[in-house]
Image (spheres, rainbow, N blue to C red):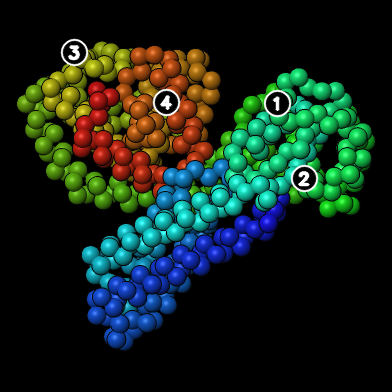
Amino acid sequence: MKTGFYDKHYNVLLSAATMVGDFLICVFLYILFIKKAGYWELPGLRQSLVVSSMLYIFCIYTGGVILFRRNTKNYQIPLLVFRNVIYYGIGYIIIMKLGHFRVLSPYGLSLFIVLLAVSSTIYRMIIRYSVRIYRSRAVNRTNAILVGSTVNNMELYREMTEVSYYGYNVLGYFDYEPNPDFPEKCPYLGTPDDVIGYLKEHDEVEELYCCLPSKYHDTIRGLIHYCTNNLIHFFSVPNLRNYLHNRMHFYMLGNVPYLSIYNEPLSRVENRMIKRVFDVVFSLTFLCTLFPIIFIIVFIITKITMPGPIFFRQKRNGLDNKVFYCLKFRSMKVNADADKLQATKNDPRKTKWGDIMRKTNIDELPQFINVLMGDMSIVGPRPHMLMHTEEYSKLIDKYMVRHFVKPGITGWSQVTGFRGETKELSQMEGRVKGDIWYMEHWTFGLDIYIIYKTIANAVKGDKAAY
């Protein structure tokens, strides 16, 4: 089986096989649990099995299968599985209750969901590593040649060859003269005028990647004509590296293709709806249950330990750089520098009680009100003071990109080591890179993971929380 272009058909089969396996795991575990609960012989249980199975198929189908994609990271697989089983669990409860089916007990359902997630993750990881091994075998590699030796094709060569399971065998490159910067392992095969002659003598070539400038349009058209008539896949590599070094993302508007320098999952309406519904449900639940108790405790201790208001309101930059008032429990004495200076490790403005609130993230809890109002999300880039936004936007490239999404109570940068004071510019640069990474890789499962990491850090104590 060929890789490269043929992956499209190969991956369809692999996706189908993966989803069938997931489905069988779900059916097996569900039967096991309802038999263990003694429900198997009760009326309606087999109908619930059918409904449950169809629901799970819908969840894994909409979630998709990403394990075969060459740039998929290992952690993304369990995150996708987690997303699938969470949606399945919510849908199961709603549909079973509406249909008056007998359902598993809360404990049984929770255990079933956990085992389903673990089993599906293990199954998918086994398939992933099997695919890697298969693609790493030399016999399954795709033979390709490069025409043109611009930076784009040099980068393409590295991408094709640095990871063995990508499955490429690059035979060499053509250009009007040898490029001394091109990797030595990739031999120079001649000029673009020699390509067709080379292809006639080497019928093992399956793919051709061309990045010649448009002024050689006659040569390019000749290559396209030969490739399309000789079962060789022709790919045009855009010459964007001359002025742009970002990863590009391909989109279609009707029949018109265009490229974006950022991938923004939250630009899609359905993803924004999922995130907003979760924000509203989560924040409402918290504000109506735990928050009143926490507020009373904070109110009493704050009034005893320091004069002034309970809440601290500060203007910060949010979505599309719009200004909003960010709410916090006040952890410092009233001071004139609140809107100018970040909190430091031994900041004299903090009280002992304020230090405790910061270390445990209690001071951030009023921001659930901001979430409910729509100014913030539970997860996203942390909003910065107006002065810091103005200052850092002039010093850090791409700083303003973080404002393409709503700011969050917690974020990817905060759980990966970039929380707290930024003494050096490199620390803020690391935070901005993390924020942009989150924006480009958002999934519902990633939000859940960040919330989990935030709670875990709060329980054990975050050294950077001051």
Determine which of the numbered discs, if any, sits on residue 348 in the image. 3
Residue type for callout 4: Arg
Q: Nearer the viewer, mark 4 or mark 3?
A: 4
Inspect the image, locate mark 2, and give the three-letter code of the amino acid beneath it.
Glu
Q: Is residue 75 left or right of residue 61?
A: left
The answer to whether the residues at label 3 and label 2 have Cβ atoms under 8 Å apart is no
Classed neighbour count for the residue bearing mark 4: other residues with Cα under 10 Å, few (<14), some (14–19), many (≥20): many
Helix or strand or loop: what does disc 1 sit on? Answer: loop
Q: Which corner quadrant of the image does residue 104 belong to?
A: bottom left
Identify the residue at image location x=37%, y=82%: 46
Q: Position of residue 303 (x, y in %)?
A: 9, 27
What amino acid does circle 1 point to? Pro
Residue under pointer 2: 207
Instruction: Provide the residue designation for mark 4.
Output: 431
Cα separation between marks 3 and 2: 66 Å
Q: Is residue 272 something one can see in this rendering?
A: yes
Residue ID for mark 1: 183
10 Å crowding of disc 1: few (<14), some (14-19), many (20+): few
First in sequence: mark 1 or mark 2?
Answer: 1
Secondary structure under the numbered disc 2 in the rendered image? strand
